[in-house]
Image (cartoon, helix red, strand yellow):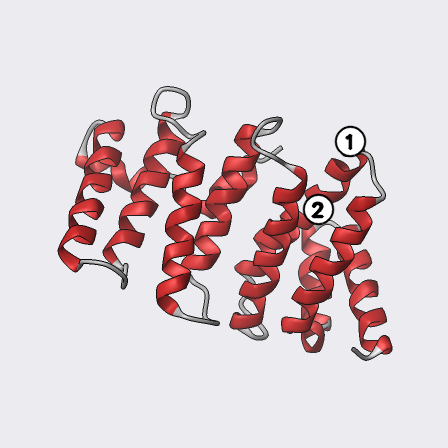
Amino acid sequence: MNQKRDEAYLNLIQSLLNSPEDEQIALLKQNLELLDDNFARYLREWATQTFAAMESEEAIKFIIPIFSFSNLIQQFPLGSKSSNMEIAIAGYEMALQVFNRDSYAENWAVIQNNLANVYRNRIKFDRGENIERTIECYEAALQVRTRDALPLDWATTQNNLAISYSRRIKFDRGENIEKAIECYQAALQACGSTNSISSLRWFDEDSKHLF
C-alpha cells in the first residue's frame, strides 16, 4: 500500500481523535477522498497494533473517541455510503477488542447493537450474510440487555431484531416472519402499549448514553 496514503490516513485518524464532534464533521468534509475501504483497513490494522502496546485503562481512553467516530461516520451523508459503513464496522470491531463482555457488559452490548445497525445497512458483500451478522449482533446484545435489567434497551433491541427477521433472506420465509412477530410482541409487552413503540430509542440515541 502506498506509504504516503497510509500517512494521510494516520494524520486524519489522529486529527479526528483529538477533535470534538463538530470539528470531526468538518475534517471529514475536508478529507472525503480519504474515506474509502482502505481507510477502514488501515484503521483496523493501526488500532490493533496500538492497543497491543497499551494497558487496559489506557486502551479504554483511546477507544472511546474511535467508538464515537464510528457513530458519526455511519451517519455521515457525504462520500461513499458503502465505505462509510466499512469504516464504522472497523471502529466498532476495534471497540469490542477493548470492551469485552465479562468486564464491560453494558458497553459491550451497546457496541453489539450499533454494529448490528451498521450490518443491517451494509452495502458491500452478500446481503443475506449481512442480515445474518445483524441478527447475531442483536442476539448478542440481548444476552446483556435483558428485560429485567434494561427493559427499554431490551425492547429497542427486540424491535430491531424483528425488523431484521422480517428482512431475512436465508431459511424459511414463514419461520422468519413468525420470529419477527414474536420479537415485535415482546417489544410491545415491555412498552406496555402499542403507542409506546414509537418512543423506543434507536441506535443514534443509544450512542449518546455510552461510557
Q: Residue furthest left?
A: 174
Identify the residue position indicated by label 1 in the image. 57
Q: Tell which tag, 2 or 1, sits nearer the viewer.
A: 1
Looking at the image, which is closer to me, 152 or 23? 152
Q: Residue 146 in the image: state x and y as whole percent.
A: 38, 26
Q: Residue 97 in the image: state x and y as whole percent.
A: 65, 43
Task: Say which amino acid is labelled 1.
Answer: Glu
Q: Quadrant of the C terminus?
A: top right
How crowded pointer 2 is (Cα within 10 Å; few <14, some 14-19, many 20+) is rated as some
Q: Residue furthest top?
A: 148
Task: Say which amino acid is labelled 2.
Answer: Pro
Q: Which residue lies at the image location 76% right of the left edge and 37% below the top edge?
A: 61
The answer to whether marks 2 and 1 mark residues whose Cβ atoms lie closer than 8 Å is no
Tell me: 131 left or right of 123.
left
How crowded pointer 1 is (Cα within 10 Å; few <14, some 14-19, many 20+) is rated as few
Q: Residue 115 in the image: state x and y as whole percent.
A: 50, 50
Marks 2 and 1, how far apart in space?
Answer: 14 Å
Q: Which residue lies at the image location 58% right of the left edge and 35% below the top edge?
A: 210
Q: Is residue 163 above or below residue 103?
A: below
Identify the residue position indicated by label 2 in the image. 65
Q: Is residue 34 visible?
A: yes
Q: Which residue lies at the image location 66% right of the left edge and 65% below the top edge?
A: 40
Q: Residue 147 in the image: state x and y as whole percent.
A: 34, 25
Callout 2: SS: helix
Tell me: 27 left or right of 135.
right
Q: Is residue 202 visible?
A: no
Q: Quadrant of the N terminus?
A: bottom right
Tell me: 199 left or right of 44.
left
